[in-house]
Amino acid sequence: MHPLARAVVSLLAAAAFAAVTAGPAAAQAEAPWTVATAANDFGADRDNYSYTAEPGQRIDDGLVIANHGAAPLDLAVYAADAFTTGSGRLDLLAKDKPSTGVGAWVRPGQDHVTVQPGQTTEVPFTVTVPAGATAGDHLGGILASVVQGGVERRVGTRIRVRVGGDPRPGLSVENLDVDYSGTANPLGSGNATLTYTIRNTGNAILAARQSASLSGPFGTWRVQADAVADSPQLLPGETWQVSVPVHGVTPAVYLAATVTLLPLLTDAAGSTAPLAAADTTAHSWAIPWTVVLLAALVAGTIVVLRRRRGRHGENEQLPERDEVGVQPDGRSH
């Protein structure tokens, strides 16, 4: 479990609220309360809070809490920064973890509220964008929570603030690596695994549509990886680890791995638009060791045979020894 997610809140992009639990037993029962956006000048029946603001601007809004249970609820109300977990879910920091972004900009009008059975209560809150806030997307959420049996249960909805300024959406691929696994069949192909890190280098929340391929020298024997799932939405500065299997890779000695990222930008209205795609390439060795060993064996055999033939030829070229006879008188002839 993520160290910041002892009590985890799941924020759905298209839902006004998400029930939060902190264990399998608690997950079997939904929280007896829900939260929703207040109806005001920003609209009614909003899925979540989304603002476009300038540094120094103040925004007033409200959170509606409904008690669907049979007993009064004493709930804490607070805001927290958002982050993306290792499983790709959007969560909020635990209450005891300090926020530096949206979670610090939001001030509820009440930090505790009691909601009677079957009733709703509206809690006003303000969002004050700091004068020095950086341009781009900032994400957090506002929650209503209760501690039951030592476990905090939370229900919340997200708050997205797009601060005016120069938009700089950008993604990069880092630490692209190729791990090739060959085959004993000298005429066969092997498998490879590409690993890399996607980093949000810009100031906008982005997801990545991605594809990957491997090829030999000069683009020969290109093999496309199977479909790669889109990354989750990444906040500015966040990273996402990716591992992609590629099958049927020819051991072409020197491989080129190419990863293509297509950034996906979601605007305040919820519409998603693709940005310009970018390629990243890295190289790795893919030695066909079976072929190398066979070639070495053949070469060694040829060398041995040539040496043997050379020695045999030398022996055939040696002159025969003269026979020397001895006469009875001791003279040779």
Image (cartoon, rainbow, N blue to C red):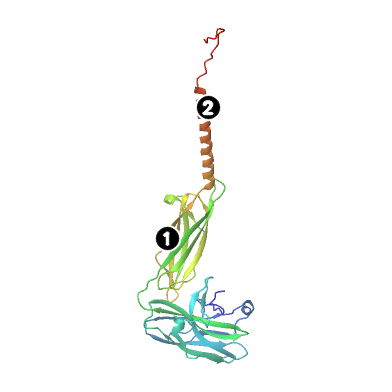
Return the residue at label 2: 312
Q: Circle 1: is it few (<14), some (14-19), or many (20+) Cα within 10 Å? A: some
Q: Please say if 143 is above or below 187.
A: below
Q: Position of residue 209 (x, y in %)?
A: 46, 65
Q: Please say if 175 is above or below 310.
A: below
Residue at 48% x, 59% y is: 177
- Is 177 displayed left or right of 135 in the figure? right
Q: Position of residue 200 (x, y in %)?
A: 43, 70
Q: Is residue 230 visible?
A: no
Q: Tell which of 144 and 297 is nearer to you.
A: 297
Q: Residue furthest front?
A: 329
Under mark 2, the amino acid is: His
Q: Residue furthest left?
A: 166
Q: Tell which of 201 and 289 is nearer to you.
A: 289
Image quarter hosting the N terminus: bottom right
Under mark 1, the amino acid is: Thr
Q: Residue furthest top?
A: 329
Residue at 53% x, 47% y is: 289
Real-space Cα separation, disc 2 to disc 1, in angstroms: 59 Å
| Callout 1: SS | strand
Q: Is residue 102 visible?
A: yes
Occupied quadrant, residue 268: bottom left
Q: Please say if 223 is above or below 186.
A: below
> Which mark is on residue 280?
1
Occupied quadrant, residue 74: bottom right
Q: What number of labels is visible? A: 2
**Mark 2 or 1, nearer chain start:** 1
Q: Position of residue 230 (x, y in %)?
A: 49, 66
